[in-house]
Image (cartoon, rainbow, N blue to C red):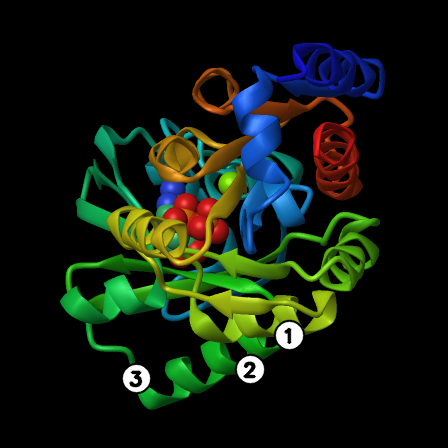
Amino acid sequence: STPAAIASGLSAGARRGLLIKGGLPLETLSRVKTIAFDKTGTLTAGRPRVTDLIAFGKSEDEVLARAAAVEKGSSHPLAKAILVAAEEKGVKIPTGFGASAIAGKGATARLTDGFVLVGSPRHAAETSSLPEEVATRIRTLEDEGKTVVVVSAGKTVEGIIAMRDEPRADAREAILNLRARGIRPLMLTGDNARTGKAIASALALDVEAELLPHDKLKRIEALKRDGGVAMIGDGINDAPALAAASVGVAMGGGTDVALETADAALLQNNVSGVVDLVDLSRATLGNIR
Ligand code: ADP
Ligand code: MG
């Protein structure tokens, strides 16, 4: 064997901000057929901004304030976007009790007049009835690549909030470069299918959307059996998929949990690092063969 070639590959990577935890991940990387990406915080910057707010019955400020009360305890990027918007508008955020996250679906809290839910349209439709007019506006916003959340109290829809999270500047080029290397890039997202499709087509990759955390894990396990898969992610919610993949790669700006779970990390925190990683693995393994 040539441990020396592996060692020099690992240190060449480290010099370029590609931290790889050993020879095995490097070797596995050189052979993967698919590279699966998380969307939020990985292909996008992970800093969504509120672009549209439509209120029904209440004022826009009131809907924003109530949504912010629900999102106060959440660390989700969408929650942060809503809190930033509330702060920028200077609305007074009411006190929420027992705020809790519903993974992949939304968040809820009890305000003085009852429970309020901020969640995906799909999840909101399970508890409230979305009037056709509301559903149409949601679809239009989603086709623009925006993520829409519904603010509801019981069966009543109080408003919708749309947010846009810009793709990372180098994402499209990096995706095309992976394709050129014979790898299939794929986006896995919990976001709805329309938003996922709009962003995926801008970045020229395939997408599977509306995946709950356990669905993502199942897809990764299947892709692992089918020729090997590298999973690229940044969040706590990505940790199970990073662990299950043939190789898990964390974005450098990601959470500690993702960095600890992954087999490799991209300190530059950009998508092109994935292409560099593939090239490094192939060059190193080429040295061995
Ligand atoms: P992603 O795969 O893009 O990281 P998630 O699995 O974290 O997405 O979330 C999927 C969807 O669930 C979001 O697009 C949103 O509609 C809803 N959601 C999750 N967390 C929240 C939250 N804190 N507030 C509002 N909606 C949320
Ligand atoms: Mg993410």
Q: Does residue 252 appear in this view? A: no
Is the residue under label 1 in contact with that under label 2 (CB below 8 Å)? yes
What is the C-alpha distance between the residues marked 3 and 2?
Answer: 15 Å
Residue identified by numbered label 1: 144
User: Could you tell me residue 125's position as x and y percent?
Assistant: 23, 71
Q: Position of residue 35 (x, y in %)?
A: 57, 51
Foreground residue, 6 or 112? 6
The kind of residue on which mark 1 rests is Glu
Q: Answer with mark 1 or mark 3, whichever residue precedes in sequence.
A: 3
- What amino acid does circle 2 point to? Thr
Q: Is residue 277 above or below residue 134?
A: above
Q: Which residue is mark 2?
A: 140
Is residue 167 left or right of 128 when viewed as pictured? right
Packing grade of label 3 (10 A; few <14, some 14-19, many >=20) is few
- Type of amino acid under label 3: Pro
Do the CB atoms of the residues marked 3 and 2 lie less than 8 Å apart?
A: no
- Residue 270 shows in this picture: yes
Q: Which residue is mark 3?
A: 131
Of 47 and 246, nearer the camera is 246
The nearer-to-camera label among 1 and 3 is 1
Residue placed most toward the observer, 88 or 179? 179
Residue 267's quadrant in the figure?
Answer: top right
Q: Earlier in the sequence, mark 3 or mark 2?
A: 3
Residue 16 lies, in percent from the top left, at: 84, 21
Disc 2 crowd rating (10 Å Cα; few below 14, some 14-19, many 20+) is few
Q: Looking at the rendering, which quadrant does residue 31 occupy?
A: top right
Does residue 273 appear left or right of residue 108 in this picture?
right
Q: Residue 209 in the image: x percent, y percent? A: 42, 65
